[in-house]
Image (spheres, rainbow, N blue to C red):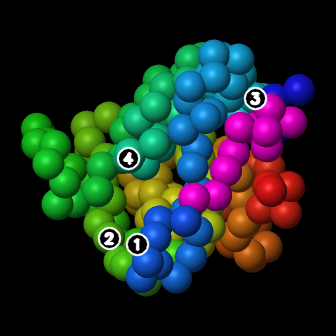
Amino acid sequence: MLSRRLVELFRWVDPGPGSSHLVSDLSGWWRDPEVLAGVGPALAGLFPAARPTVVIAPEVTGLLLGPLVAVAAGAGFLPAYKDGGERRRVGPMRWAETPPDYRGRQLRIGVDARRLGPGDRVLLADDWVATGAQLDALHRLVRDSGAEFVGTAALVATCPAPVAERLRLRALLTGEQLP
C-alpha cells in the first residue's frame, strides 16, 4: 500500500545548530520507483469524478509531482513559479500574493496567463500542506482567471481544518501518521 510505503520512507532531519525545528526529508519518496509510479494515480484518485483539464502545482517539488498527477488524471500541467526565482518567464504572468507561510514569508506566485482561463477545470497538487499559503494564492488565481477550481490533492496535510475545507483538500497522509 502506497501510504504505508510513504511512512516507511519518510524521515525528519535535524538541520543542525541554530535551527528551531526538524526538516522533512522526502527524498526517499522520489528515489523509490514504486512510490514514484504510484503518487500520481493516488493523488488523481482522490478526486475520481473531477475531470480536471489542468493540474497546477507550485515549484519546486510541484514541478515533479504535478506532471505525475496530470498524466494520471488525463490533464495538462501548468507550473506555478515563485517570483524572484532564477527561471526566466516568457510571456504574461498572472500573479497573486500569498498570506504568510510556515516561515512567516509572503511570496508572489504566478502562472502563465495564456495557459489558464474559462473552461478550465483546475486541480491543485502539492507534496505538503502546512499553512496552505501558496495554495490559497493559486486558488485566487484560478478564480480570477474564470477557471473552475475542483480541489487540492496533497501527499501530506498538516494544516488546520478551516484551511483544508477552504482548499477542498484531500491528502494521502496526515502529520499524525508520520514518525
| Separation (CA) of disc 2 from disc 4 | 12 Å
- The percent coordinates of residue 156 (x first, y second) are 70, 52
User: Considering only order in the chain, which callout, 4 or 2, is on the residue closer to the N terminus?
Assistant: 4
| Separation (CA) of disc 2 from disc 3 | 29 Å
Judge the density around disc 2: few (<14), some (14-19), many (≥20) Cα neighbours within 10 Å: some
Q: Please count the marks in the image.
A: 4
User: Considering only order in the chain, which callout, 3 or 4, is on the residue closer to the N terminus?
Assistant: 3
Secondary structure at numbered mark 1: loop
- Is the magenta region chiefly helix, strand or loop? helix
Mark whose residue sits in front, 3 or 1: 3
Q: Are marks 1 and 4 in contact (CB under 8 Å)?
A: no
- Residue at 37% across / 78% down in the picture? 105
Residue ID for mark 4: 59
Secondary structure at numbered mark 3: helix
Amino acid tagged 2: Leu
Amino acid tagged 1: Thr
Q: Are marks 1 and 2 in contact (CB under 8 Å)?
A: yes
Whether residue 70 is in magenta: the answer is: no
- The percent coordinates of residue 8 (x first, y second) are 79, 39
Please state if 177 lies on the left or on the right of 68 as rendered.
right
Residue ID for mark 3: 42
Segment tinted magenta in the rendering: 4-13
Q: Quadrant of residue 160?
A: bottom right
Residue ID for mark 1: 98
Secondary structure at numbered mark 4: loop
